[in-house]
């Protein structure tokens, strides 16, 4: 039983890490990358909306990973109970 509790606790820590990493990734995408792309004219004006979309998708991968971890924990609870 202790092993099961430890496994679930470790999965919970993984979800917390993903949730804590999301603001960092969001800032890296929109606070750093997007201003560089706009300021140095790496992309044309018509390509900037697509770049914003891709950067938002990159930032949301951490949300998806945290939710997937929470679903995995729920699956294990359902399996064990």
Image: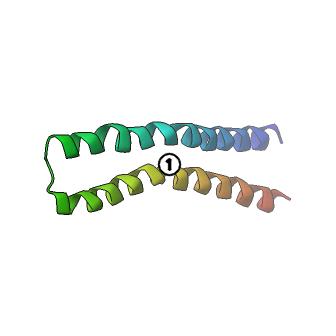
**Residue 37, image quadrant:** top left
Q: What is the quadrant of the C terminus in the image? A: bottom right
- Check the image and report above or below for 56 versus 34: below
Looking at the picture, does residue 6 appear above or below residue 81? Answer: above
Judging by the rendered image, the residue that carries numbered circle 1 is 62
**What's the residue at 72%, 39% (across, down)?**
9
| Percent x, y of residue 66 | 58, 50
Taking the image as shown, residue 36 lies to the left or right of residue 64, namely: left
The relative height of residue 4 versus residue 72 in the rendered view (above or below) is: above
Could you say where residue 70 lies in the image, as x and y percent from the top left? 66, 53
Residue closer to the observer: 52 or 10: 52
Identify the residue at horizontal 61%, vertical 55% (top origin). Answer: 67
Q: Position of residue 76 (x, y in %)?
A: 73, 56
Q: Is residue 11 above or below residue 54?
A: above
- Residue lying at 63% horizontally and 39% vertically, measured from the top left: 16
Secondary structure at badge 1 equals helix
Residue 6 % position (x, y)? 74, 37
């Amino acid at each position: 039983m202790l092993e099961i509790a430890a496994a679930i606790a470790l999965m919970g820590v993984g979800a917390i890490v993903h949730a804590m990493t999301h603001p960092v990734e969001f800032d890296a995408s929109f606070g750093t990358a997007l201003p560089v792309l706009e300021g140095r004219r790496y992309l044309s004006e018509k390509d900037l909306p697509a770049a914003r979309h891709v950067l938002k998708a990159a930032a949301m991968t951490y949300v998806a990973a945290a939710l997937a971890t929470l679903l995995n924990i729920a699956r294990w609870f359902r399996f064990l109970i």
